[in-house]
Structures are given as C-alpha cells and as structure tokens.
Amino acid sequence: MNKILVTVLALMLVFAISASAQMPTDKGNMYIGGGLSFTSFSGDLYEVGDDSPSSFQIYPEFYYFLQNNLAVGGTVGYSKYSLGDYSDSEMGFGVGGKYYFNLNSELTEAKGAILPYAAANFMYVSMKEDDGTNEIKHTGYDINLAGGAVYMLSNSVGAYGQVGYTMESRSPEEGDSVDGAHFGFMIGVTYFIIK
C-alpha cells in the first residue's frame, strides 16, 4: 500500500513539474505572431474619378523569452496603398520587447488562461510614393507602446487584443521631416513554440 501511495505521489509530482514547464511565457520558449490585412474600398464615398483605393498590410513578428514572461524579438512590416496611378508602399523592420504579467502563478496549463502584456518596439521605415509621374522616397521610424491580453485557446495558440499608441517620423529625400501619432486597436492570433 505504501509503495502505491509513494508511486502515485511521485507521478503527481512529475506531472506537476512537467505541466508547469509548459507555460507559453517560460524562459526559452518562442512566440510567432503578426497581422495580415487587405482592404478594397468601393462606392461613391471612396471613388476618385473611375478609381477606388485598396490597401494591403502584413506584419509578422518573432520573439524569444529571455526569462519567464520577458520576450525580445523583431518584426518586419510591409504595407501598400494604391488609387489609380498613385501608390505608396512602406517597408520596415524593427526590434521590441514584451512583458507578460503572471496573474496566476498556480496555473499548470495554459489553455483558458488570460495573459496580459505590455509591449514596446522601434521600427525603421522606408517609404516610396509614386503618382505615375514623380517618385518620392522617405525614411523614418515608428515607436510603438502597447498593452493587451492573450486568451489561450490551447496550450500553444492564443487570440489577442491590443491597444497601442504609435509615434511616427518621416523624412523625405528633400525637405523637412514630418511627425505624427495615432492610437490603434488590433486583434490577432499568436502561436507559442514550447521548448
């Protein structure tokens, strides 16, 4: 009877240790996420002559957890907007960090957990405007501060919502630089690679 009890307790301990090591924000794990969108505008509200605008964006990102709950990584971004002969495209790459707040240190399974986080990143940007006659190139940067939460759909896949504030600066090849800022909301899906 004692051997059975000791065996059961040992198995429970091994399960608890291995389960706790499976949290997605543990040291050594990785995170892959990002966004993709395509928008085609139509109707009298958006038409300019016979043309209607369209836009495309893709922003993949990759992070590595240096320690529990703290990840650093990078992102690459591309966006294109077009309307008739006019188009502008933007390509960027950057670095950033995310910190996940551990609201429940007792969790042994990620599925169903809510993982709030704060994030910051810096992105270098190169932009090209083309109106069919002239081409203007810009360089600049974006600084983004964000907060959000991931709801874990499984032990490695989560859906997230994020609110962010972005400060932007663009400098044309000739002329003065221009600055701007915007607030935004984003939703998406993320995948954690559990080590």
Image: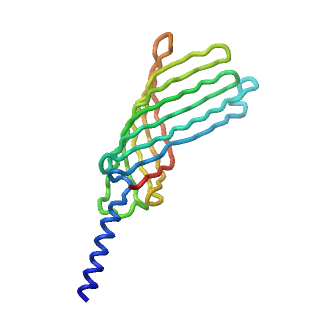
Taking the view exactly as shown, the residue that stands out farthest to the right is 50
Residue 37 location in percent, x, y?
A: 59, 40
Q: Is residue 10 left or right of residue 63?
A: left
Residue 29 location in percent, x, y?
A: 37, 51
Residue 141 location in percent, x, y?
A: 44, 25
Which residue does the image show at 43% across and 61% down from the upper left?
Answer: 111
What colour scheme governs how the chains and residues are painted in the rendered image of this protein? rainbow
Q: Image quadrant of residue 4?
A: bottom left
Vertical position of residue 62 compared to residue 193: above or below = above
Taking the view exactly as shown, the residue that stands out farthest to the top is 174
Residue 131 location in percent, x, y?
A: 65, 18
Taking the view exactly as shown, the residue that stands out farthest to the left is 2
Q: Is residue 4 left or right of residue 119?
A: left
Quarter of the figure that contains the C terminus: bottom left
- Count numbered badges in the picture: 0
Query: In the image shown, does 40 or 31 lie closer to the viewer?
Result: 31
Which residue does the image show at 31% across and 74% down from the upper left?
Answer: 12
Quarter of the figure that contains the N terminus: bottom left
Which residue does the image show at 49% across and 10% down from the upper left?
Answer: 175
Q: Is residue 105 left or right of residue 81?
A: left
Vertical position of residue 144 compared to residue 11: above or below = above
Taking the view exactly as shown, the residue that stands out farthest to the bottom is 1
Which residue does the image show at 44% across and 43% down from the upper left?
Answer: 62
Q: Is residue 53 left or right of residue 165?
A: right
